[in-house]
Amino acid sequence: MATPYAKLPAWADYGLIPLINLVVAFLVAGLVVLLVGESPIQAATLLIKGAFGSGAGIGYTLYYATSFIFTGLAVAVAFHCGLFNIGGEGQAYVGGLGVALVCLGFDTVFPWWINFPLAIIGSAAIGAFWAMIPAYLQAKRGSHIVITTIMFNFIAASLMVYLLVGPLKPLNSMAPQTRTFAVDAHLPKLDWLLEMFGATIRSTPLNLSFILALVMAVAVWALIWRTKLGYEIRTMGFSPKAARYAGIGEARIIVITMMISGALAGMMALNPVMGDQHRLQLDFVTGAGFVGIAVALMGRSHPAGIVPAAILFGMLYQGGAEISFMMPNISRDMIVIIQGLVILFAGALENMFRPAMQAAFASFSPRSMGMGTAKREGA
Amino acid sequence: MAQAAIELKGINKSFGAVRANRDIDIEIPQGTIHGIIGENGAGKSTLMSILYGFYQADSGEIFVKGQKASIHTPNDAIAAGIGMVHQHFMLVENFTVLENIILGAEGASLLNKGIAKARSELQRLEKEYGLEVDPDAVIEELPVGLQQRVEILKALYRGAEILILDEPTGVLTPAEADHLFRILRMLKDQGKTIVLITHKLREIMAVTDNVSVMRQGTIVATRKTASTTVEELAELMVGRRVLLQVEKGKAKPGDFKLSVKNLTVKDGRGVTMVDDVSFDVRAGEIVGIAGVAGNGQSELIEAIAGTRRAESGSVTMKGKPIDVTGTADPAELRKRGLAHVPEDRHHVGLVLPFEENENAILGYHDDPKFLNGAFLNIDAIRSDAREKIEKYDIRPADCRLRTANFSGGNQQKIVLAREMENDPGVLIVGQPTRGVDVGAIEFIHKQLIAMRDRGKAVLLVSVELDEIRSLSDRILVMFDGRVVGERGPDATEGELGLLMAGVEAQEAAE
């Protein structure tokens, strides 16, 4: 996204500022912990230990991070086109339908390594379709995409409830979920990956879709910065007028971008549905679509920022569960508050410390910055 | 001489490493018109923004009528009796004159008292200064000259004794500008002090008592206007002798390259902006379109270049039609040899956050030489950008630098290099030197003449009458969406000025 600020060195822009924001978020969170009468130091230790202290902890952290990488990339791609895709939650939800249909249909027909690419296509296609409708309405009718994508989250939820208590539910079952997939529709676990680093574990939900998420991060980078389509997306995102001048079709780019965004969000469903639960359940997305917004903001819409930001949120999910288990005073809601503070400082207030940083950098290395804005203001 | 209305002592202001104002000392006597002149980026606007409280000086002192003033916000400035008329008016378009004047000084939560007070005060100001304007007219229905008058009234209503005008004539016809100068002289006679910021030397000579010249953040000279010349001021501004007139040979016009017939264009609200316009541009000539900003020139070139739909009419380029009312596509027109330097380079011609090399292919990114299949050929793009940087002397010579970090003149060169180097048959240029420093203007003008001499058809739109007159082989004048006259390059400024103001050709001849 274009910022009205002078340029900082890249390492400060992408490394230092998010770090400062994060530290402040944790300091404020520490105050809240103090307020309920627990020790913030102890809570922080539990958080870190819970997330990274054991093989199982790391497995869970990366499992959550996998979902957030997908949804974070989805939001980031739309950001580059100047679109705010709030609909990642719904797109991921219906993406689960794509995974489930493939798995239910072929789990006794094909081996997993054929079912996996089919499920990728299924989830991406349905996610893309779900994003395409708001995109079309934005491009052709001017309906604001923020509003329509939010509405489509609700439509997705209603649709899935209908399917899971109706057509997709096995006969005589009380639970609103599909039958469990056969083993050939289970994604391989990545326990070996953790064991390579010397961790001993019983079982974690970390699965092959983590690797797919990393591949997608590289693919998104290449798409945005190395392809003609990415060039057109960025042009549209920075300046629709310049895009029109360059002969870039506005409607076409909006629809294509949103379909890519929706496809990425849809792929998120592979992780829980095919990788862990092995069945399609109600509400399996559990807010990952919204966390993706924070991840994209914090990662500054760059895959190299999104992956660490997703791991950070994975850590908060996993470590947070640990804290609420060990510290009875700190409920699950407290974890949500901490996550909220991180989103607040890293996302909404991401530029709060920027002017001060710029002043600091200007006094240390005056030549590296400030030229552009000063020239314009001095005119 | 009377007491100084404003005195600035040792003002310094830096933005990062750029020192926009350096040790500025200036004294503006009460009851005078003081001109501040300098190129874009010389620091004029920064200095006035400090005086009006938009910026804080890093060091230095401001005295208003001998009293040390601390001005931190525009409200402080207003309280100290300083008013400002901005280059871009700060008026609410769909409010009436009265509503605009009390805006920010409403007095109470109910408006009736404030309005009544403003109405009587307005009548007084009208009588005193001859600033007539209908208090109940809606702003957007007023001509630009009157809107500016409302800005002046707004400042006076707030008790301004010192009036700063930032580039006030940019949007005015020559006649409206003359009227403004009459008002300024009248205000001076009433004891007001006026600071006039401009880069137009002629205005300085016409209306000011004293003039300060700024260059690179410092005041390089202050002169009595009566004892200086245009040439001296130009030299002081640029720091070297400048050619104010471009040298060019006679045009050798060839075949028709671009023909426009009965073109009509409406804006988003359905208002006719271009009304039944017809003209031709031939190979090897520059056709200039003169006119006050907002008389349809922008819409005209946008329609021809395919970025705006026309209502009716036809355009042909090199004998083949351009579907201006339907599917004209800028990308396709570019491939057919139509290059377009848009008026607004910041939002249209360039994507400012992009690296320079990314902007050097904007609109030409479909060209196979910049692509490897679906991927961009980064090496080809950068080496092409480096060639253009070299050829057009774009500084700094760094194709990876963010475009926003180039100066206005260099940004314009990036656009020109892109549009000219593709060897187009027809070049449409809008405001080629707006916001460009004098040195770069010379270069850009030479490039445009060179295009003409290579047998290209050039259509030039500019609000700078001097530019139109010195470059064009034929001059069309637009007023209210219509072409109201065609003149040769030897037409006088007065003649063109009358046409621009909408006075009919016959009257102009009398």
Image: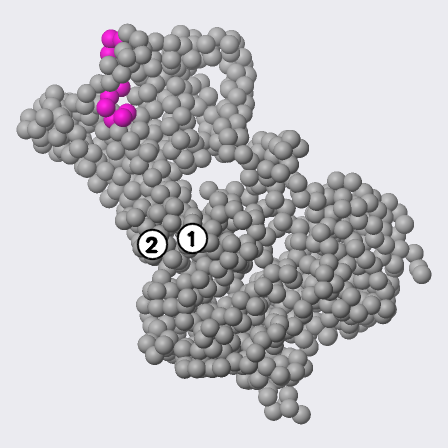
Residues marked 2 and 1, same chain: yes
Looking at the image, which residue sits at the far right? B1
Residue drawn where x is 57% and y is 34% of the image: A354
Badge 1 is on which residue? B384
**Image quarter hosting the C terminus of chain B:** bottom right
Residue drawn where x is 55% and y is 56% of the image: B393
Is A30 magenta? The answer is no
The total of numbered circles placed on residues is 2
Range covered by the magenta-colored residues: A201-211
- Percent across and percent down for residue A239 are 45, 52
Which sits in the foreground, A122 or B22?
Answer: B22
For the residue carrying disc 2, how many other residues have a C-alpha within 10 Å: few (<14), some (14-19), or many (20+)?
A: few
Side of A147 where A178 appears, left or right:
left
Visible in this render: residue B88?
no
Looking at the image, which residue sits at the far left? A109
Scheme by which the image is coloured: one colour
Visible in this render: residue A360?
yes
Asked if marks 2 and 1 touch (Cβ < 8 Å), the reply is yes
- Percent across and percent down for residue B141 are 58, 70
Q: Which secondary structure, mark 2? A: helix
Decide: is B380 above or below B290. above
Residue drawn where x is 40% and y is 42% of the image: A79
- Percent across and percent down for residue B255 are 41, 82
Badge 2 is on which residue? B369
For the residue carrying disc 1, how many other residues have a C-alpha within 10 Å: few (<14), some (14-19), or many (20+)?
A: some
Please state which amino acid type lies under the numbered disc 2.
Lys
Q: Which secondary structure, mark 1? A: helix
